[in-house]
Structures are given as structure tokens and as C-alpha cells.
Amino acid sequence: MKDKNKRRYTRKPLKIEARYQDKEGTVLKGVVRNISIGGVYIETPSPLERGENLQLTLDAVEVGRVIDVEGTVVRHEPEKGMGIEFTDQSNKDIKKLISTMRKLDQASMLALSRSAFED
């Protein structure tokens, strides 16, 4: 198992729908579990094989758009999911999504700390 401390980018937990196609062109779905500038982990019963390239569509409600991104399968867990490394690790839409998630995290932490003082 890969040491989490050796990852290049910090991962953010996330739960949004992802769509991708297999070699035959069948549209498959999964759920994004975490994301970073470098890639994404998708929980799916139909993971593609390691080394396969794919076009991925993420339903990013947080930024009010659908994000299309290309990547390569770098981790394959049969009937569980797959890790995808993005081809373009400077994708502006992915950066915007992660930035928005950070702002939402900070706002909820601030709200929690305020409520702790109100009692």
C-alpha cells in the first residue's frame, strides 16, 4: 500500500458523480471519493484496467458546472474503484473546484467555532 505521506498533492474528500466510458464505449458511473490537483479516486463496481486512458466527466455542483478531464488509471481495485491521474495537472476547473471546497471547509469550521462560544 502506498504511503499517504509520499503523495504529491493533498487530497480533499468529495462525493460527486463521475461518468466515463469503457473500451466498448459503454457509459459507466461512479462516485468520486477524493480529489487533488493530481488526480481522483472513483468508487465504482466497474473500474478500468491500470494504464487505460479515459475521458472523465465530473458533476461539480459546487462550482456550477460539469468538468471534463482526461486521465490514466494508476490504481485498480476490482469491483471497488480506481485511482485516476489527471493528464493535465494544471486544469483550471479542477483548481477552482478544490479552491471552492477549501472555502466551504473554512466557512463550516468558522460556523462551528462560533457556535461553541454561543452556549
Image (cartoon, grey):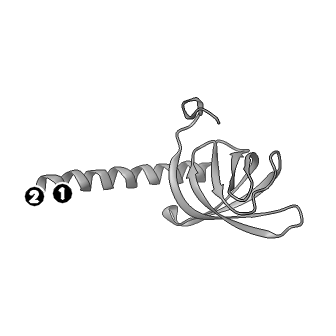
Indicate the position of residue 49 as horizontal and vertical percent values: 82, 51
Indicate the position of residue 106 as horizontal and vertical percent values: 34, 49
Residue on which the image places disc 1? 115
Residue type, numbered disc 1? Ser
Q: Is residue 94 above or below residue 15?
A: above
In the foreground, 53 or 48: 48
Query: Distance from label 1 to label 2 (Cα)?
Result: 7 Å
Residue extending farthest right:
24
Residue pictured at 32% horizontal, 54% vertical? 107
- Element under disc 1: helix
Residue pictured at 59% horizontal, 32% vertical? 3
- Tell me: 54 left or right of 80: right
Quadrant that contains the N terminus:
top right
Q: CB of mark 1 within 8 Å of CB of mark 2? A: yes
Image quarter of residue 112: bottom left
Residue type, numbered disc 2? Asp
